[in-house]
Image (cartoon, grey):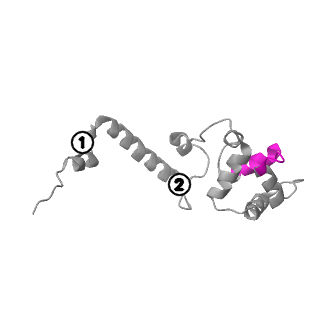
Amino acid sequence: MFPERLRALRKGQNLTLNELAQALNEHLGPGERPNTPTQIGNWERGIRNPSFVEVRKVAEFFDVSMDYLCGRTERDGHDLAKLFFSNQDLLFEGTVLTSQDRYEIFQLINGYLKGRSQRSETDTFYGKQEELNLDFKE
């Protein structure tokens, strides 16, 4: 499962093996060896297995869980409410959200979801639009 998911993540971001190796090497810890394109290609083909440290680096780079990479979960979902109240930096189009931003966005989403449950399908804009007769005759 790891080879397929690694390849899909890399290709999904249009990265070459060389670009991914360079990105993983940007923050090498003490005693860590640099990654090579050949090494990553071997991981993708299932010829070699990465170490725990390498899997962690890949997971952090692609912002997915190690469980997702290893096939223990089908989806790498996140509860937005937990993310908004976590200590992790949250970014939107490259801008870090302040604690006030996070709170206000949380309130907007929460209000939307509560309001949505009280609306019927025909109350929505799109529901009304579907009821219009668009058969124009001249």
**Frontmost residue, 43 versus 138:** 138
Residues packed near mark 1 inside 10 Å, few (<14), some (14 to 19) or many (20 plus): few
**Farthest residue toward the front?**
138
- Amino acid type at image mark 2: Thr
- Amino acid type at image mark 1: Asp
55 with respect to 129 (left or right): right
Disc 1 designates what residue?
123
**Frontmost residue, 134 versus 12:** 134
Q: In the rendered view of the protein, which quadrant contains the C terminus?
A: bottom left
Magenta-colored span? 45-60
Image mark count: 2
Q: Secondary structure at mark 1?
A: helix
60 with respect to 133 (left or right): right
45 with respect to 73 (left or right): right
Residue appearing at x 18%, y 55% in the figure: 134
Residues packed near mark 2 inside 10 Å, few (<14), some (14 to 19) or many (20 plus): few
Residue appearing at x 75%, y 46% in the figure: 56
Can you see residue 116? yes
Asked whether 5 falls inside the magenta stretch, the response is no
Disc 2 designates what residue?
98
Q: Quadrant of residue 117?
A: top left
**Frontmost residue, 54 versus 107:** 54
**Frontmost residue, 82 versus 13:** 13
Across and down, in percent, residue 23 comes to: 74, 61
**Farthest residue toward the right?**
31
